[in-house]
Image (cartoon, helix red, strand yellow):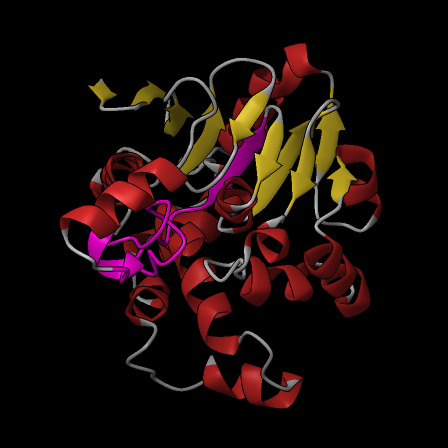
Amino acid sequence: MKEQFVETEQIGHVLVITLNRPKVNAISRALSRAIHAAAEHLQTDPNLRVGVITAKGDRVFSAGWDFRDSVQQDAETGDRDFDMTHGPGGFAGITRYWDLKKPLIAAVNGAAIGGGFEIALAADVIIAAENAYFELPEMQRGFLPDAGGVQRLPRRIPYNVAMEMILSGRRMSAAEAKGWGLVHDVVPQAKLGETAVTLATQIAKGAPLALQALKEVMQVIDHLPVQEAIQVTRAPDARMPIFQRMWTSEDAKEGPRAFLERREPVWRGR
């Protein structure tokens, strides 16, 4: 299937979402909506369990915000409310898509600049090609990376490292990003797609409801004290309906049964 500026391919239970807006996958309103549409397909299709987001080519993942599109937007409407103009998932389609509960891997094939870096930060796992790098140059453009850069980066790497990166706008190599734990793995460009799909396929072996419940729980307990975080999962909580369904699901019975019978579980997603 091909959406405007975005291509999708299903591989088993994995959906590969590929950005393809030449030349640098600059994030326009149309691209944001196309990314969100692909992510919505991932979330709503019961046959899909894990997503991979990557880009065409071997140089650029995404160069970030399309300034030309922004100027056109201002001329047309004067509306600078990104949540409204970029669609239901916010800037880049997924930076504010809180209902996306299926795991998402970012396979960063090249430069991830500004909003392109924020796309990667919206994913659950980042894998990078050796030539990839990460950069938040917004300070030098007169604004802040507030579609996830300011909010997410200091929670992924040490605060002082994140602040220095945002303040200076310098590039962080894939190797350095791995050193800080921001990137799970760095691989040769030629092996990036295979590595990401292999990991996604391994993750997809998990029970569908449990995979989604993990993201749901993590959103709720993020930065809670350990005692409070454990207590949250011990009582019914309206914020975690998937987590509650998981415990009474057929799959929750099938997993232990399959283990005792020494066979692979047959998940039903319910």
Q: Residue at x 28, y 60 (%)?
A: 80
In the image, taking residue 129 as reference, residue 120 lies left or right, namely left
Work out whether residue 153 can be spotted: yes
- Name the residue at 20% across, 48% down: 75
- Number of marks: 0
Q: Quadrant of residue 113?
A: top right
Q: Nearer the viewer, residue 72 or 4?
A: 72
Which portion, as a residue range, is magenta? 80-108
Residue 186: x percent and y percent?
74, 29
The extreme top residue here reads: 190
Question: Relative to 72, is 232 on the left or the right?
Answer: right
Indicate the quadrant where residue 187 lies.
Answer: top right
Q: Is residue 87 visible?
A: no
Quadrant in which the N terminus appears: top left
Q: Can you tell which quarter of the image residue 45 is in?
A: top left
Which residue lies at the image location 49% right of the left edge and 51% below the top edge?
Answer: 122
Residue 55 at x, y percent in the picture: 47, 23
| Image coordinates for residue 26, horizontal then vertical, percent | 42, 32
Residue that protrudes farthest toward the front in the picture: 75
**Residue 88 covered by magenta stretch:** yes
* Image location (x, y in percent) of residue 19: 40, 25
Q: Main secondary structure of the magenta part?
A: loop
- Residue at 53% in and 44% down: 259
Q: Is residue 77 above or below residue 33?
A: below
